[in-house]
Amino acid sequence: MDNSTQVILAVVTLLGSAGIWRYAEARLKVKAEQKKEEQSASDTVLYRDDLKSRVEEMDAALKEANKELLALTEKVAKLETENSFLRREIDILKRN
Amino acid sequence: MEQLKVKAQEIKARLKARFNALRDIWQYSDSQPTEITLAAALVILYPIATFLELGYSPIMQLLAPIAGLYQLYCVSGKCLSCRVKASWVTFSFYLLAAVMYLYCGLLFKGPSYWGWILLSVSSFGSLKRIKKEELHRKNG
């Protein structure tokens, strides 16, 4: 086989393989797009997305509630201290 | 008679399930081992076989090992887009070998030469699998 034949065959094969691959790639992309659209429209995915947003909301609410609980605990501690002082003063006043 | 029909249907369903499983494995399994094998064959066997059977051809015997090494480099780098390119080059070289053998009248001389067609199909399957993986990762 001479060199020119080899080069011609190589170029033809290269162009052929590029053509085959372009066609196959385009088909794969179309199929992937279709699959993506089907998935995004399915009930399972919608339900999952809804669950995700609910979990996020509940997480935020839990953090807020934790903060409030901490503030309330602080207030209760203060009031308990005040109450014990007041009782002591009442006792002193009663004795007098 | 009815029992035979039911049994035949069962066998048919089983065979269909096995065929679908094989198709899924072919389409979606990890292709790195296949890529490494194809690349190694391109580096070692391809130049020797083509030199002994077709004669000296610089395109096939000098460029193919470089393409094989590039494929190995991409597989080891774990880069998908690089692997796609390298697999396309590998597929092109195997297709070129099949075309060259066909041109020289060797391809249908004996069943052992059909291996070039098998290698072309295998490299094309590998190429498709990697592209699918790439699209899957892009689409999430």
Image (cartoon, rainbow, N blue to C red):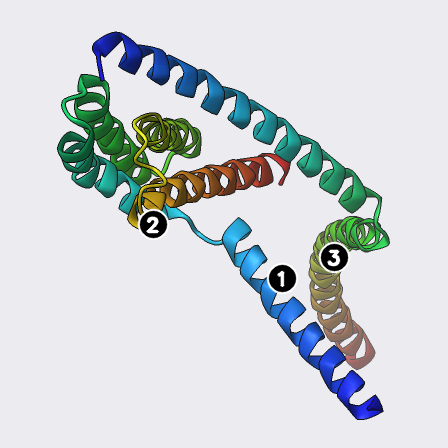
Task: Give the mark, 2 or 1, whose residue is nearer the N terminus.
Answer: 1
Q: Amino acid at mark 2?
A: Pro
The part of the image, by quadrant, that contains residue B121 is top left
Residue at 78% of width from left, 38% of height from top?
A37
Q: Residue at x 14, y 36 (%)?
A: B48
Q: What residue do we see at 77% from left, 74% from top?
A: A87
Can you tell which of label 3 and label 1 is closer to the viewer? 1
Specify the amino acid type for callout 3.
Leu
Q: CA distance from mark 3 to mark 1?
A: 48 Å
Count neighbours of disc 1 (C-alpha within 10 A) and say few if under 14, some if 14 to 19, many if 20 or more: few
Q: Which residue is mark 2?
A: B111
The N terminus of chain B lies in quadrant: bottom right
Q: Position of residue B112 (x, y in %)?
A: 29, 49
Please give the residue where the numbered disc 1 appears in the rendered image: B20
Q: Which mark is residue A62?
A: 3
Q: Which amino acid, mark 1?
A: Asn
Answer with left or right where residue B23 lies relative to residue B91: right
